[in-house]
Amino acid sequence: MAIATIPSEEALKQEFAELFREHFEFVYCTAYTVTCSRQDAEDVLQTIFLRLLRREVPPPLKHSPKAYLYRAAVNESLNIIRSRKRQELRDDFDSLEASATTGPDEELQRHVVDAMAQLNPLAVEILILRYEHNYSDAEIAKMLGKSRGTIAVTLYRTRARLKKILLGALGDKL
Amino acid sequence: MKAGKTNIDDILKRGLRSASKDPRDQIAGTRERILHDLLSKDATAAERSVHTGTSTVAVLPWFRVAIVGTAAAILLVVVIGSAWLRKPAFAVVEDGDRAVARLEPGQVVRTGETTGTMIRLADGSRVEVRSNSELTLERAADGVGIRLAHGGVIVNAAKQRDGHLYVHTRDVVVSVVGTVFMVSAEEQGSRVSVIEGEVRVQQGKIETKLRPGEHVSTAPAPEPRAVQEEIAWSPKAGEHLALLQQSLPAQLPQAITQASEASRGRFEEASIRPCTPQQPENLPAGARGGGGSGALEITPGRLYAPCMTVARLILASHRRVLNPKDPPAILLPLLNQPLNQPVDLPNSPEDLRGGPEWILTDRYTVEATANVSADSRTMRTVMLPELLERRFQVKVHTEVEQVSALALTIVDGGLKIKPHKDGDCLNGRGVVFPNPKPRCSRMTFGFVGPNARWELGGNVLFAFTMALGMAFDLPVIDRTGNTDRFALIFEYAPDEAAPGTLRQCQKSIQRSPDQLAECTGRPTAPSIHTALNQLGLKVEPIKAPREFIVVDHAERPSPN
């Protein structure tokens, strides 16, 4: 039996740091767009990357770390906004971002977050890829491993559903 | 803005917060701060090697893709120790009958290029790992899981008392309670073969039971390999084959039947039920089988056609590849397909001729199941025609006829547009329309005020003919002989000269203007012919060949 080469702890840290730096912005922007809160977005980052460090994730994700991280970011962000809604911590929502954008869109943004909490994760994944990351249908399909038709139909239905929810919540204010 | 005019794109642009415009140094600062926090939180988690006595097992974090080891060796390597053997292990690596290394859940095991290894689980199950394999052991809710990233394993699963042993690959989950089977995971898909007992293979929502001698593959074009070949790499191949021979006799007839059904391109089971006139023909979007253009639902191992006429089933089962002579009934996304690459092109009802009247009126729900390895194209283009022929006695042939069409040619003065060069189109993605310049590699259609507008972001004229076909409601054939790519904006009046565009304009007024701007008012752009001339192009009427599907014979279905 031959001797294995075990990577040094330093080398592993280095690799992790490279991975983190490579995907940070994509994951952070995703989490921020869903949660609408920088603090929550940072929490999402911490949660999913700590999982990687502790290897509490299945190995197949190494085939597409970006897709895995993106999906994890959306799911974790949805968990946060849903739990936020459940606990009715709406006050926190306002206070967390008090220093950030303020203006007529803030109420809309809050309702968009509430509406996203009602969508399934795939719909949110597609929505954020389209509107935050400006991906085309083909690029979304490739990243999520779905057909272009599925993406187009899901996006169409998601837009229709969001429109209905937002019109119901805000009516003429839109 | 009135509710009816609400544009959801605008709302979402305002309603979704974005961090992408944050200053770069702010993003970098946040990134480094979080990274520092992470590394200090889990300074030693990146590598969880087990050091016990004199034994060492290499444990790899998932993100470490390339581990350089001695090429011909298995990665786990160990000097024999004894201290850790006192405590029951989750699994151990065996060398002969000796346990030489302990494995814990989450550890990644990789074998070398030429050498495999043997793992014994706590319940007595043995896992033979082929060379060039990578797997992880894990606890499952009701047993033990093996995640096979790539390579192959032969699992001799001990009888599970009250749980299961699972093998996960990228696309299937195999569950057993006690049996011998082989799983291999490759880039193209996974294969599962059974030597003894019974295993369940879950692919998406489809579950297949396999018995000795049977195998399934999720690869698009599965290689027909016998179980004997699949296990030939094992040092214990002889033992496995003997076991297979013992298990085979009772199961063989069924195994042969199932394999032959798939190889003959037939569904294993099919149910055809007539629909009543009350059952809706066009199911609403979101309903089972509804909402899509074809309403034919194909999932792995299953085809479902809800209340469809035989005519629609015939059309659905005949697909062609895109070619310049096709009629313009084509979806816009296809326009960006690269040339010379076959793509599915849906048939339109006008493509079907002949046959008894009832094939256009009587509706049937068809439900058919196939071996999970049958891909959707095979089910649609091979198995569905076979089913139609067997149960409906459908006989069809194709005919080519000369039909009216238009030819796109260059005017005498020559082409007035220049081939696309850098900067002629806008890079990046976006859903905005109209754009000051076309989006690169895109072809977009819409209305700007009263005018129709095409934006071509570096497309060939062949793609442009597809667009013109939609505008003229006739096939348009590219006879320019030009293969350059062009970035251009093409605006014209949606009037009688462009009947297809005029119809779209009228439709856009009726429906919610989410995607198309209003198409009202007096057009300010020239007619389509003038606009084409301004580019140095013209269209002229010609006759062109078009393929039709002719139904020679059909009968109402035989009973299930």
Image (cartoon, grey):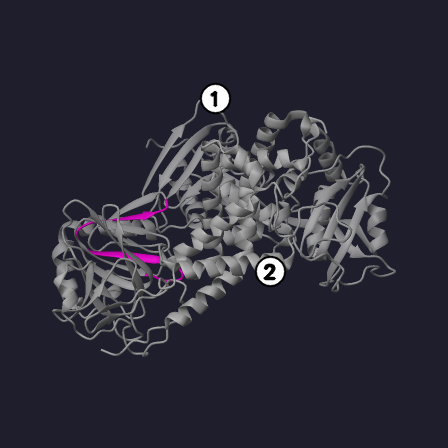
Q: CA distance from mark 2 to mark 1?
A: 44 Å
The circle drawn on residue B117 is none
Quarter occupied by the C terminus of chain A: top right
Image: magenta residue range: B185-204
Q: Residues within 10 Å of mark 2 (few under 14, many from 20)?
A: few
Q: Residue B272, image x and y in percent?
A: 38, 32
Of residues B327 and A128, the one nearer the viewer is: A128
Q: Residue B149, image x and y in percent?
A: 35, 61
The circle drawn on residue B277 is 1
Quarter occupied by the N terminus of chain A: bottom left
Direction top: furthest residue:
B278
Residue B392 horizontal side relative to residue B345, left or right: left
Please, what is the three-letter code of the amino acid marked with disc 2? Answer: Asn
Count the labels in the image. Answer: 2
Determine the image quadrant of residue B305.
top left
Residue A24 horizontal side relative to residue B480, left or right: left
Residue assigned mark 2 = B340
B61 is higher (above) or lower (below) than A96: below
Q: Chain of mark 2?
A: B
Q: Residue B453, image x and y in percent?
A: 77, 45
Circles 2, 1 touching at the beta carbon (< 8 Å) = no
Determine the image quadrant of residue A59.
bottom left
Residue B513 can be seen in this image? yes
The majority secondary structure of the magenta stretch comes to strand
Which residue: 72% across, 52% down? B464
